[in-house]
Amino acid sequence: MTVDPAAAPLEVDPLLDDPETRIIVCCGSGGVGKTTTAAALGVRAAERGRKVVVLTIDPARRLAQSMGIDSLDNTPRQVKGIEGPGELHAMMLDMKRTFDEIVEAHADQDRARAILENPFYQSLSAGFAGTQEYMAMEKLGQLRAREEWDLIVVDTPPSRSALDFLDAPKRLGSFLDGKFIRLLMAPAKMGGRAGMKFLNVGMSMMTGTLGKLLGGQFLRDVQTFVAAMDTMFGGFRTRADATYRLLQAPGTAFLVVAAPERDALREAAYFVERLAAEEMPLAGLVLNRVHGSGAARLSAERARAAAENLEEGRIVDQGHGKNGVREAASPAGSPPDSPDPGPGQLPHQETESQTPEQPSVNQLTAGLLRLHAERMQVLKREQRTRDRFTALHPEVPVAEVAALPGDVHDLAGLRAIGDRLAGGSPATGAA
Amino acid sequence: MSRLQVVSGKGGTGKTTVAAALALALATEGKRTLLVEVEGRQGIAQLFETEALPYEERKIAVAPGGGEVHALAIDAERALLDYLQMFYKLGSAGRALKKLGAIDFATTIAPGVRDVLLTGKACEAVRRRDKQGRFAYDYVVMDAPPTGRITRFLNVNDEVAGLAKIGPIYNQAQAVMRVLKSPGTAVHLVTLLEEMPVQETADGVGELRAAELPVGKVIVNMVRPHVLDEEAVNGVAGDRRKEVTKALAAAGVSAPTKLVGPLLEQAAEHAQRVELEREQRAVLAKLGLPTYELPLIGEGMDLAGLYRLAGELRNLGEAR
Ligand SMILES: Nc1ncnc2c1ncn2[C@@H]1O[C@H](COP(=O)(O)OP(=O)(O)OP(=O)(O)O)[C@@H](O)[C@H]1O
Ligand SMILES: Nc1ncnc2c1ncn2[C@@H]1O[C@H](COP(=O)(O)OP(=O)(O)OP(=O)(O)O)[C@@H](O)[C@H]1O
Ligand SMILES: [Mg+2]
Ligand SMILES: [Mg+2]
C-alpha cells in the first residue's frame, strides 16, 4: 500500500532530529498503539543521537521488561542496548506515587502524613477518573523542569477518547476547585460555627442531606484534604493550567495514533480539530497496524474464484510424494476424489487421516488464495476508512505503520516500528 | 441461565457489541431482555443506529422469533436525584443541589455512590415484576465498565464501606450485593487473542474471584478463520513452491511466478499469528472457564453483523 498522494507523508526523522523538538505527545483512542509508538520513537531518536526520555503508561509487561522499566519506581532508567550516539531513558508512570510525591514536596512531614492518610486522598489518588491523566501531565512537567533530556516522548493513558488527555486534568482540577467544594470548605476554613453563619439554611440542609447520604466523616475528609492541598500549592486548577500551557509551547509536537478503523479514525478527526482549536501543534497522524499485500494485483474476487477451482477438484493436483503416487495411478483429468485403488484413501481425506503436515498442493494453494482474499478485503476496508479521514483533513501528514504479525515487545520490534514510522519500509510485501 | 449478565473486558475488545448481541440472542423466541449501559456514552444507540437513548427504557430491536430487546442508558445524576426525591422529599431543593454542583459532587467523588446507583438500577430491573407477577424482563444484560474497574464497580459494598452506615445508599448497596453475588448473576469477560487483553482477562478473573463475584464466560471476540497452519506453510515453503506456482496457473491466476512469493509470505505471517493465538488460547484455557469464540465480521460491524453475532451466540447455547 502506498501513501495516498492526497495526504502528505509525515516526516518523522526530521521531527526527531530537530533540536527544537522538545516534547512529543502520542495520543489516540484505546489500544491503537500509543505506547508502542512512543517507545519506538524514543528508540529511534536516541539511536539518531538525541538524549531522550520516554514516559510510558501501562506498557505491556514484556515490553516493559525488555526495556528494563518494569520496577515501577517512578523514575527514568537508562535503557540498555541502544545502538548509536544518543541515550534512551524510560519510565513507567506510577500515578499514586506521583501524587504522593507532590504532597511530600509541598508539605512538611506531619502535614504530608496527614494528607497521605486521609481516606479521601487515598481514594482520589488510587484511581479516580482523570487522576491518571492529571498525573501524566504532572510528570511531564517534572521531567521538563529537570532539563536533563533534550527530547521527552510522552505516552498517554488508555482511555477511550484521546480528548480525555486534554480534558481530564482540567476537569479534575476545576472539580476540586469547584463551587461546591468551596462551599463545603467555607466552614472548615473559617473555623466551625462562625463559618456556618455564612451559609444559608438551604445550604446547610443540603450538606445535611449529603452528610446523611455519604456520611459526615467523608465530607469532613474532603474538607480537610482540599483545604490542606489548597494552601500547599495554590489549587489544582492552576497547576493543571500550567502544564496545559506547556503543551501549547513551541517545541511540543502531537502525534495522533489511530488504527485504520472507523471508530479510531473518527476519534482521531475529533482530536485533530480540538488541537487546532487549542493551538496545539499537530505533527501528524500515525496510522498503525495497516495491512498491505505484495500481491495486491490479484483481487479478492479472483483469488476466491481460483481457490474454488482448486477445491472443486477441477484441477489435477500437482503434488509429488504421496500425491505423486496417486498422480501416476489416476489418469490425468479424472476427478481427484474418485475412488483411489492405491493405498485405499481418498485424496481429500489424506490431510485429516495421515500426514497433516503435507496437504495436497491444491489444498495448500487454495488456502493461500483464500488467505489472500481475506487480506484484500481488509485492505479495501482500511483504504475506505482512511480515505474518509484524508477527505476531512487533507492537511494532516500521515505515516503508515504496517501491522507486524506478532506483538511488539523488544528493542528489535521497536526498531522495526521506527523504520516504518520513518517511511523506511512501508506496508509492502506481505506485511 | 443467570438473569443478570454483565459484560466486561479490556477497552475496545467489543464489550458493547457483545452485550448487544447477547441481549438479542437471549431475546429469541418471545423473550424480553433489557440492555443497559452505564457509562453515558450512548454506545447502544450508535450500534443500533438510533437516536440517543433517554433515561427511560425503550424497545430498540426485535429478535428472531418475536422477542424484544429494550434498552436503557442509566444516568447516575438522574438516578441520585430520583433517590433523594424518594427518600428525602427534596422538592425543588433537588434542582438547587444540582445547580450548586452537589449532585455532580456526590456522584463523581464519593467512592461507590455512583456505582451503587448504576448497579442498583440494573438490579431493580432484574427483580421487577409486572401486574401478573411475571418478571418484567427475562434477562438484563449490562454493558459494563472495563476489566480494570469491573471488580470495584460491582463490589459496591466495599466501596461504600466508608460512607454512612444507614440511609438509602447503604441499604441499596446491601440489596445490590445480594443480587450480584448470587448465581443469578454472571460476569463475562470479552477478550481478543492478543497478549494484553488476555493478560487483563486473567487478572480480572482473579480479582472477581477474590471478591467472590460470579465469573461467567470468557468471550473471545474478533476471531479470524484459520486457513492454514504453520506445518502446512512450512511444507510449502521449500521445494513445493514450484508446484504451487503450477497450481496457481492451473487455477487461472495470471503471472503466478510473481505472486507465489508474496502469497507464501502472507501465509508465513498467518502461521505466525496462528501460533501466537494458540499461546493465548492456552493462557485462557488455564482459567478453567467456559469459553465462547465469536468471529471477526470482516466487512465491519453493522446491524447485520450484530444479528450474525447473536446467531453465533445462540448456536453456542447461550439461549437455553
Ligand atoms: N504495528 C504493529 N504491529 C503489530 N502489533 C502492534 C503494532 N502496534 C502495536 N501493536 C501491539 O498492539 C498492542 C497494543 O499496543 P499498545 O499497547 O501500544 O497500544 P496503546 O494505544 O498504548 O493501548 P492502551 O490504550 O491500552 O494504552 C500491543 O500488544 C502491541 O505490541
Ligand atoms: N466481532 C466483531 N467483528 C468485527 N468488528 C467488531 C467485532 N466486535 C466489535 N467490533 C468492532 O470493534 C470496535 C470496538 O467494539 P465495541 O465498541 O463494542 O468495544 P467496547 O469494548 O465496548 O469499547 P469501549 O471500551 O470503547 O467501550 C467497534 O468498532 C466494533 O464495531
Ligand atoms: Mg498504552
Ligand atoms: Mg463500549
Image (cartoon, coloured by chain):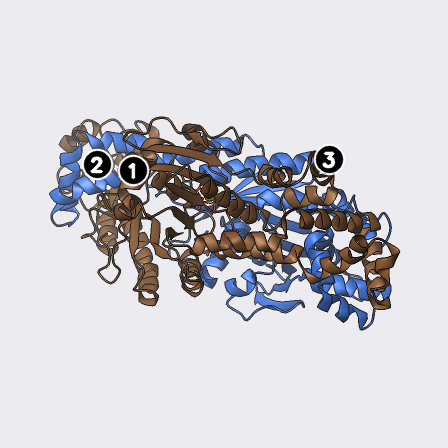
Chain colours: A brown, B blue
Q: Position of residue A336 (x, y in %)?
A: 21, 39
Tell me the crowding category of disc 1: few under 14, some 14 to 19, or many 20 or more residues within 10 angstroms, Cα based. Answer: some
Q: Which residue is mark 1?
A: A416
- Which of A288 and A26 lies nearest the eye of the viewer? A26
Numbered label tally: 3
**Kind of residue indicated by mark 3:** Asp
Q: Which residue is mark 2?
A: A361
- Which of B275 and A34 lies nearest the eye of the viewer? A34
Q: In the image, are marks 2 and 3 on the same chain?
A: yes
Question: Assess mark 3: CB under 8 A from ligand 3?
Answer: no
* Residue A110 disc label: 3
Image height check: is B82 above or below A154?
below
**Kind of residue indicated by mark 1:** Ala
Tell me the crowding category of disc 2: few under 14, some 14 to 19, or many 20 or more residues within 10 angstroms, Cα based. Answer: many
Image height check: is A381 above or below B281?
below
- CA distance for labels 3 and 1: 50 Å
Q: Residue furthest bottom?
A: B92
Left or right: B283, with B34 as reference point = left
- CA distance for labels 1 and 2: 33 Å
**Mark 2 residue element:** helix
